[in-house]
């Protein structure tokens, strides 16, 4: 089966910085794919190459089998792109914004008018459609921002951090809408800082760090990468080296990593039950000033693979 | 292909008209300034009224020729009066009394001396009180000097070749070598006399064309900042569509602006800028050049605010050195040459030719060609800049 959106070997360099290197993934029709990565990991650069805003140094992108580099207009016509910022005209009404972007996709006048009504209904803004965008709340703007990408019924919807800065009510409306679109068979590429959104919406997740995809799979596959072990984050004060040696040798500790001057990360089976032994092991050498136990989930996997929390 | 282009252009036009800047920058300000400048400084240069004393102690052909030419010159009729005076002393007294502005004195034997190849000297008396009359008298004497020099040279040459003294005069005159005839040329300024309201009207039109078209290219940077440019580019449209759509509106508004300033200047002051087809073609070429230059600025600027500042500086520098703020003939010689490095300089030069000579399109074919060349070069550099920047 032809992937709705596929990329292979994508690389992009800005001066001396290799922003993206050898990125590749494929999204099947009706599949929701999440791209997770900390700030500066290369998510937006990757998306810019996928929608034709940046020319990759190497690699290629196909949309429903159409090569983006060879047939850019045909390929772009199948993509619905929702940028991270509110890329709309504040001096126009919501309806006028939709009409403008719909025209760029070549929708005939009558069809466009009907699609605008459908999309306004989908994003729940039919009653505010004729108000100036500048008077909308942040959440309402976000919903129009998404709506503008849906007018031409794209094969794949690319959402770059669509819920940044929105209220819980709008966030729920956005996620519900996105789930409906995926259920209706639209392919989805979704990036977010909110792990729970990705876990809720996406079938598969790619974790990107320093411009590379470091892991990819379903939620279960990714979580399994760190096994059933809990991650324990410790902050120590005192003889940290001596305490670290003791912790490494402790029964139940699978892995120990120094993550800073006074910080240590442990991977331990049944982390909560090992905690008393940990406190005892460091006693006399160092004092535990903070401790956090993270059970195996996508967040823990992310931390394990990238060494940082998603919202760092 | 055309529909997205027209959609971008329609949105740009609507935005410009909605916020009122198009109306103010394209029409109200240039027309108001052109009118104010025209009212304050317009009209011809102040009319010259000079009385020049004429002392003819020679009573020969040369002095008679000068008197005849001055009295019959159409340009000087009603503005220059020759007053015959008997002696240099009398001329000096009249000058001191302010009865005359300057005086020309032909010494006794002047014609004979020139005829013999010995040259001659005409004296000019001037007064600090009447500088213009002094300039006119000196200009007349300059003309006489060149005739005298030529005739002296011809006589000496004839004598050197052994022509008999009594045949020299006849030989020189028969061969047309510097006859005694003296002709005073018309206005020495290229293009003839121009009403200053034409200068300032065209100057304001040329200056504001930069602001009008520059605003459209500046909005590209605003759209980049708010993300709408990338959103457009992510759509199924050729990469150049946003730039072309805005260029179309900027160029159109620029043409409307210059034509409106031209029309208002002509109607308010009752002056003609020259052949309408040629004026229109020249103004369109100017707007084209202004569009390319402001596009170049936008292609290199990092922010819309930076583009605004640079466009402002470029516009005023071009306007000053190009004769849009100060008439070209008032600029020193080297600045008149510098003016030809600017589109405004070529536009001013072309309009002066049209208004002064009454010529048609062929009169301004060179200025139009240069303006198109400027547009081509600046446009090419802008395209390269956009490829690296906004479209990179």
Image (cartoon, coloured by chain):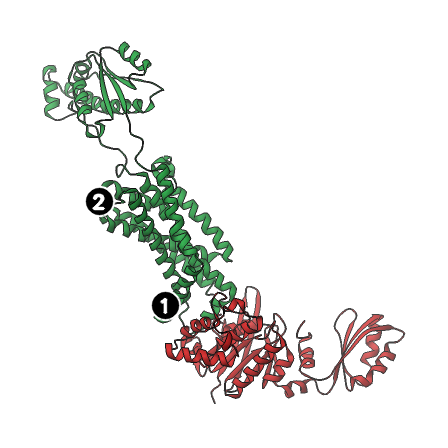
Chain colours: A red, B green
Q: Residue furthest front?
A: A127
Label number found at residue A109: none
Q: Name the residue under label 2.
A: B359
Q: Mark 1 points at which residue?
A: B6
Residue B375, given in percent of the width and then of the height, sits at 35, 54
Residue A153, given in percent of the width and then of the height, sits at 45, 81
> Crowding near pointer 2: few (<14 within 10 Å), some, many (20+)?
some
B36 vs A230: above or below: above
Q: Is residue A70 something that shows in the picture?
A: no
> In front here: A141 or A282?
A141
Q: Subunit of mark 1? A: B
Judge from the rendering whether residue A226 lies leftward or rightward of residue A81; answer left or right.
right
Number of marks in the rendered image: 2
Q: Is residue A176 something that shows in the picture?
A: yes
Q: Which of marks 2 and 1 is in front?
A: 1
Judge from the rendering whether residue B366 lies leftward or rightward of residue A2; answer left or right.
left
* Secondary structure beneath label 1: helix
> In front here: B352 or B194?
B194
User: If you read the primary sequence from the N terminus, does the residue marked by circle 2 or circle 1 appear first?
Assistant: 1
Q: Tell me where residue A285 sits by quadrant.
A: bottom right
Q: Subunit of mark 2? A: B
> Crowding near pointer 1: few (<14 within 10 Å), some, many (20+)?
many
Residue B361, given in percent of the width and then of the height, sits at 23, 49
For the residues labelled 2 and 1, the Cα–Cα distance comes to 38 Å
Q: Tell me where residue B144 sits by quadrant.
A: top left
* Secondary structure beneath label 2: loop
């Amino acid at each position: 089966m032809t992937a709705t959106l596929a990329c292979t070997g994508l690389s992009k360099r800005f001066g001396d910085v290799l922003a993206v290197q050898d990125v590749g993934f494929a999204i099947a029709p009706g599949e929701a794919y999440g791209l997770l990565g900390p700030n500066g990991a290369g998510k937006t650069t990757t998306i810019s190459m996928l929608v034709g805003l940046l020319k990759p140094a190497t690699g290629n992108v196909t949309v429903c089998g159409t090569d983006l580099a060879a047939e850019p207009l045909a390929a772009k016509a199948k993509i619905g792109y929702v940028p991270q910022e509110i890329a709309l005209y504040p001096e126009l009404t919501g309806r006028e914004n939709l009409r403008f972007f719909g025209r760029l996709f070549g929708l005939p006048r009558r069809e466009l008018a009907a699609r605008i009504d459908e999309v306004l209904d989908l994003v729940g803004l039919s009653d505010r459609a004729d108000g100036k965008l500048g008077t909308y709340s942040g959440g309402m703007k976000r919903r129009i921002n998404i709506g503008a990408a849906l007018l031409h019924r794209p094969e794949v919807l690319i959402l770059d951090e669509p819920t940044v800065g929105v209220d819980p009510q709008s966030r729920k409306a956005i996620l519900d809408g996105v789930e409906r679109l995926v259920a209706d068979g639209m392919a989805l590429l979704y990036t977010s800082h909110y792990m729970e959104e990705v876990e809720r919406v996406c079938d598969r997740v790619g974790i990107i760090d320093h411009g590379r995809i470091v892991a990819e799979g379903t939620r279960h596959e990714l979580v399994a990468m760190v096994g059933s072990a809990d991650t324990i984050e410790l902050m120590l004060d005192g003889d940290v080296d001596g305490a670290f040696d003791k912790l490494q040798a402790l029964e139940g500790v699978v892995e120990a990593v120094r993550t800073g001057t006074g910080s240590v990360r442990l991977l331990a089976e049944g982390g909560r039950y090992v905690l008393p032994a940990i406190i005892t092991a460091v006693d006399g050498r160092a004092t535990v000033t903070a401790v956090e136990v993270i059970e195996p989930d996508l967040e823990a996997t992310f931390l394990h693979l990238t060494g940082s929390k998603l919202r760092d | 292909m055309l529909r997205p282009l027209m959609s971008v252009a329609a949105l740009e036009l609507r935005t410009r008209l909605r916020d009122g800047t198009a109306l103010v920058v394209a029409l109200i300000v240039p027309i108001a300034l052109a009118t104010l400048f025209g009212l304050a400084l317009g009209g011809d240069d102040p009319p010259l009224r000079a009385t020049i004393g004429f002392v003819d102690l020679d009573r020969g052909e040369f002095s008679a020729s000068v008197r005849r030419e001055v009295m019959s010159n159409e340009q000087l009729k009603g503005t220059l009066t020759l007053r015959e005076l008997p002696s240099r002393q009398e001329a000096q007294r009249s000058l001191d009394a302010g009865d005359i502005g300057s005086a020309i004195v032909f010494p006794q034997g002047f014609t004979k001396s020139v005829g013999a190849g010995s040259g001659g000297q005409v004296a000019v008396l001037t007064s600090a009180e009447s500088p213009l009359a002094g300039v006119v008298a000196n200009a007349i004497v300059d003309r006489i000097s060149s005739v005298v020099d030529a005739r002296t040279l011809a006589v000496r040459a004839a004598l050197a070749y052994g022509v008999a003294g009594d045949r020299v005069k006849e030989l020189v005159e028969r061969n047309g070598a510097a006859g005694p005839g003296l002709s005073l040329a018309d206005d020495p300024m290229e293009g003839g006399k121009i009403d200053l309201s034409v200068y300032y009207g065209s100057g304001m039109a040329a200056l504001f064309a930069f602001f009008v078209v520059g605003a459209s290219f500046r909005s590209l940077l605003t759209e980049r900042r708010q993300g709408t440019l990338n959103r457009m580019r992510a759509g199924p449209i050729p990469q150049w569509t946003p730039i072309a759509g805005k260029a179309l509106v900027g160029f159109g508004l620029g043409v409307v602006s210059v034509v409106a300033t031209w029309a208002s200047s002509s109607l308010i002051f009752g002056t003609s800028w020259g052949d309408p087809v040629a004026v229109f073609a020249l103004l369109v070429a100017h707007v084209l050049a202004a569009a390319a230059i402001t596009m170049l600025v936008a292609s290199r600027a990092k922010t819309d605010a930076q583009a605004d500042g640079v466009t402002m500086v470029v516009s005023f520098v071009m306007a000053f050195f190009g004769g849009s703020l100060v008439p070209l003939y008032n600029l020193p010689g080297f600045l008149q040459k510098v003016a030809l490095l600017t589109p405004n300089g070529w536009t001013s030069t072309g309009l002066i030719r049209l208004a002064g000579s009454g010529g048609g399109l062929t009169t301004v074919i060179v200025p139009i060609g240069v303006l198109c060349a400027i547009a081509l070069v600046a446009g090419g550099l802008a395209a390269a800049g956009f490829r690296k920047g906004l479209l990179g």
